[in-house]
């Protein structure tokens, strides 16, 4: 028997003996999308034994409708704590990108040199100006350093804007990444950290017995000392199984992608971005509909029309892909982070901004789960107890 093979057998035996003495895993993360992957990777980084239970590639991931922005401007109106959370995430993204590249060799193409929200016509410019003022005037909000710029000022950074552009807002903290490569980097990191990824294992039931959680899947039961629910809109069904509450209000969004073209957009926009591969993504729709099997061409027409008015040369490009996807959306649009009083060791995480907040999930949420408790400031700001109602009564809410 070779020394290498002997070591593998010894390691396997130790793992088997350990599993007989305690739970199979320290943490089971339910959901293998970008949110669950970031938390699982962060837990693996801290040396935890982690299992990720996922529906796999057969599922209609909410990530299909993401726009890959690392974005803070405009976020948090009505919840100042969210401005602080997003700014923190933006500032930590460079560290995340660096660690992923060092570990996996994958460059997620992070670009953070500021982003724009352009306006068409004076009415839109006036409305945007008012929004920026309201954001700045929120007590307890982080300083986005967001400012309004005239069309002539915007043109210095985006020289190809069209004559209808009246100006817009700019935030130096904004940027974007290659979200598919980020997803791949997390899953590549799973292997290095010894994280077990189980596709085609949707969780149908969760119970707690003898100090451990038992998660039922079509391929058997898995046991873990802690559980993190990061299954997107499915959290609404899973959360009550562990005494938690996750009121969701998913929406549908459409994305249009053009053929590759010359580099022309050095800064991402809220609704338009040029990827590192040269294609142009267009997408800002929000529909109260949950059927993503067919596109609404009238909506795509409005999106592409606005894009062409902002950058007239886009009219010369061919559309190569277009699709719809269901986005994860908590009921009020803000994240939910909670821990259970009735089932200690159970956590839930729900958010719309899985790309923007990935750094916080990998570094902060993972750290708190590993330590066994969410920090009071986080729960105080983002607990589902803010929704009131019977379901929220089961939350920790401290």
Image (cartoon, rainbow, N blue to C red):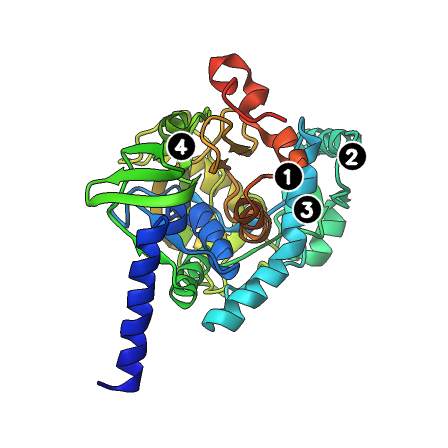
Q: Nearer the viewer, mark 2 or mark 3?
A: 3
Mark 3 is surrounded, within 10 Å at the Cα level, by few (under 14), some (14 to 19) or many (20 or more) other residues, namely: many
Residue, disc 3: 87
How many numbered badges does the structure rendering display? 4
Please tell me which of labels 2 and 3 falls first in the chain.
Answer: 3
Q: How busy is the neighbourhood of tag 1: few (under 14 within 10 Å), some, or many (20 plus)?
A: some
Is residue 316 something that shows in the picture? yes
Give how far apart the Cα atoms at labels 1 and 4 are: 21 Å
Q: Are marks 2 and 1 in contact (CB under 8 Å)?
A: no
User: For residue 235, which numbered disc appears in the image?
Assistant: 4
Label 2 sits on residue: 136
Residue 131: percent from the left, percent from the top? 71, 30
Q: CA distance from mark 2 to mark 4?
A: 33 Å
Q: Earlier in the sequence, mark 1 or mark 4?
A: 4
Q: Residue furthest left?
A: 219
Q: Secondary structure at mark 4?
A: helix
- Residue 328, image x and y in percent? 44, 35
Alpha-carbon distance for marks 2 and 3? 14 Å
Q: What label does residue 375 carry, if any?
A: 1
- Please tell me which residue is depicted at 38% across the width and 65% down the height of the picture: 191
């Amino acid at each position: 028997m070779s020394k290498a093979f002997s070591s593998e057998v010894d390691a396997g035996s130790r793992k088997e003996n350990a599993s007989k003495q305690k739970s199979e895993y320290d943490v089971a993360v339910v959901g293998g999308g970008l949110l669950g992957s970031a938390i699982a990777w962060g837990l693996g980084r801290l040396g935890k034994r982690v299992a990720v239970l996922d529906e796999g590639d057969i599922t209609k991931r909410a990530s299909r409708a993401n726009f890959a922005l690392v974005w803070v401007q405009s976020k948090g109106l009505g919840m100042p704590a969210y401005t602080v959370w997003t700014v923190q995430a933006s500032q930590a993204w460079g560290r995340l990108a660096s660690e992923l590249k060092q570990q996996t060799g994958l460059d997620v193409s992070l670009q953070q040199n500021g982003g724009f929200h352009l306006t068409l016509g004076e009415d839109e410019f006036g409305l945007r100006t008012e929004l920026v003022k309201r954001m700045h005037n929120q007590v307890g909000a982080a300083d986005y350093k967001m400012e309004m710029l005239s069309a002539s000022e915007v043109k210095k950074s985006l020289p190809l804007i069209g004559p209808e552009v009246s100006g817009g807002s700019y935030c130096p903290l904004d940027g974007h990444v290659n979200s598919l490569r980020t997803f791949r980097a997390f899953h590549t990191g799973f292997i290095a950290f010894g994280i077990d990824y189980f596709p085609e294992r949707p969780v149908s039931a969760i119970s707690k017995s003898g100090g451990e959680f038992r998660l039922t899947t079509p391929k058997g039961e898995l046991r873990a000392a802690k559980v993190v629910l990061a299954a997107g809109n499915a959290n609404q069904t899973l959360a009550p199984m562990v005494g938690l509450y996750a009121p969701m209000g998913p929406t549908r969004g459409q994305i249009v992608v053009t053929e590759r073209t010359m580099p022309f957009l050095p800064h991402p926009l809220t609704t338009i971005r040029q990827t590192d591969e040269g294609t142009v993504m267009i997408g800002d729709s929000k529909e109260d509909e949950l059927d993503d099997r067919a596109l609404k061409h009238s909506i795509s027409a409005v999106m592409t029309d606005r894009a062409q008015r902002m950058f007239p040369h886009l009219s010369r490009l061919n559309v190569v892909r277009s699709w719809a996807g269901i986005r994860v959306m908590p009921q009020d649009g803000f994240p939910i982070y909670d821990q259970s009083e009735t089932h200690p060791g159970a956590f839930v995480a729900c958010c719309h901004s899985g790309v923007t907040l990935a750094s916080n999930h990998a570094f902060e949420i993972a750290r708190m789960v590993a330590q066994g408790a969410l920090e009071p400031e986080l729960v105080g700001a983002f607990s589902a107890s803010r929704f009131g109602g019977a379901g929220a009564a089961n939350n920790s809410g401290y």
